[in-house]
Amino acid sequence: MSGPPLFEENGAMTRPNIIFIVADDLGFADLGCYGGRPAAFGPVSPHIDALAAGGLCFTQGYANAPVCSPTRFALMTLRYQYRLRGALEEPINSRSKGDPRLGLPPELPTLPSLLRDAGYHTALVGKWHLGYPPHFGPLRSGYDSYYGIMAGGVDYFTHCSSNGQHDLFEGEEPRHEVGYLTDLLSTRAVQHVQRHAADARAGKPFFLSLHYTAPHWPWETRDDAAIAPSLAANLFHLQGGNVETYRRMIHHMDEGIGQLMQALRDEGIAHDTLVVFTSDNGGERFSDNWPLVGGKMDLTEGGTRVPWVAHWPAVIAPGGVSTQHCMTMDWSTTMVELGGGQPLAAHAPDGVSLAAVLRNPAATFERPLFWRMNHRGQRALRQGDWKYLQVDGHEYLFNLAQDERERANLARVHPQRLEELRAQWLAWDATMPAIPPDASVSLGYSAKDMPQR
């Protein structure tokens, strides 16, 4: 991961402040900058679109998993999540409370701990979803401060999780606060920038993880407080929601991101701040994943390919587009490198730094990407234009450069290529722990609730 500094000012290396924004269950084409259509109320994501226009969009970027907590394990550890028992839950659920196996082990080096060791102040505002205290928690894994939720999802107004328990915390203490959760997280992020701007200007940078729950269910805009009591027994909100509500939820998040960017400008630190925006996995039932097929829980492209936007005026030229293949853990590895962190040899990253691509979007390199899922026995490998996929025991071969919708199965046309990619996937899988029989798969709904896509 070592290399020359990304940029220099007055002959000295300057490390950026880093803000890592993660949306929850956002579809590939939900944003205007990724081809999304305007809503009835107007543009859905004008502030994120502005970040893209002033920075760099990746069109071939992926999440480490098509479901929440596994991706977050990879984000934190810079490694394939399959190495950890907790990440084999698809996803972690409230039944894991008290289980010392099902979470992010505090002794492991993490993205925030490596940056903290390098002199950064670190904070998480938003969703954790990597295990519950007393065994696990953000403050035990490298964050100096934490404000947010522990579970995979909560009501936006009551801040209660699916088991009915209060789930909004300051550190590890319950925090009771009135407000729409997306707005509360945005406000905290802005306050964090204001609080640490002076230190940043003086040479002590900050790392802020801003992990929204939007646009994850339940389907509530900031005007929907009246429906919150009716959702206490079923946060999956199977009887509600629509595309317009969903787009409003994205828009509320986008407004908060606009406020955050304005705070950076007001404090005079926007130029030297790297802002990265993405989603933890592909979209859910109201998402737009066009032209991709599938969504959350699927290893088809719609479940794993997600927006990746990087904005850093000091280094990244505006209006850029990159076709570099990458996944979540690559971005974490990049951030550690840019911040001067030093990964431990015993926990060498599986991620690959994208630092050179930020400077020159055309400087792409070969990057094989591997996935597997207990759900439906899925496996996938992307190498170059080609993708090997298995679902429910059926094997497929797609040329994604010609067929992003994965409709033209070329397995019989190119049997040798299928065999080669299958062998590569099996060789990689042999380096990962096996999925144990007690690993759980939690599905919020099925064909009895709505027709499948």
Image (cartoon, rainbow, N blue to C red):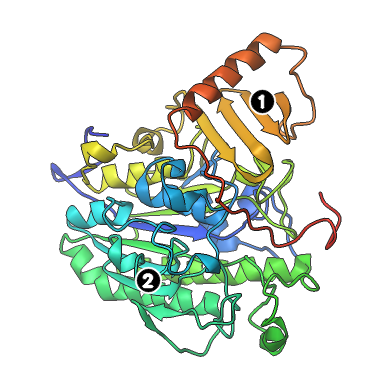
Q: Farthest residue toward the front?
A: 437
Judged from the image, the secondary structure of the residue bearing numbered disc 1 is: loop
For residue 9, side relative to residue 400 (left or right): left
For residue 351, side relative to residue 380 (left or right): left
Identify the residue shown where x is 55% and y is 51%.
Answer: 438
Q: Tell me the quadrant of the picture where the N terminus can be found.
A: top left
Note whether residue 54 is visible.
no
For residue 230, side relative to residue 124 (left or right): right
**Mark 1 or mark 2: whose residue is earlier in sequence:** 2
Q: Nearer the viewer, mark 1 or mark 2?
A: 2
Judged from the image, the secondary structure of the residue bearing numbered disc 2 is: loop
- Quarter occupied by residue 396: top right
Across and down, in percent, residue 179 comes to 53, 86
220 in relation to 405, above or below: below
Across and down, in percent, residue 390 comes to 68, 31
Identify the residue shown where x is 51% and y is 31%.
Answer: 369
Identify the residue shown where x is 66% and y is 54%.
Answer: 283
Along the line of sight, the residue nearer the viewer: 138 or 85: 85
Across and down, in percent, residue 256 comes to 51, 71
Q: For mark 1, what is the residue?
A: 401
Identify the residue shown where x is 76% and y is 68%.
Answer: 244
Q: For mark 2, what is the residue?
A: 133
- Three-letter amino acid code at the position of disc 2: Pro
209 in relation to 431, above or below: below
Note whether residue 296 is visible.
yes
- Three-letter amino acid code at the position of disc 1: Ala
Graded by Cα atoms within 10 Å as few (under 14), some (14 to 19) or many (20 or more), the crowding at tag 2 reads: some
105 in relation to 257, above or below: above
Graded by Cα atoms within 10 Å as few (under 14), some (14 to 19) or many (20 or more), the crowding at tag 1 reads: few
Across and down, in percent, residue 121 comes to 24, 64
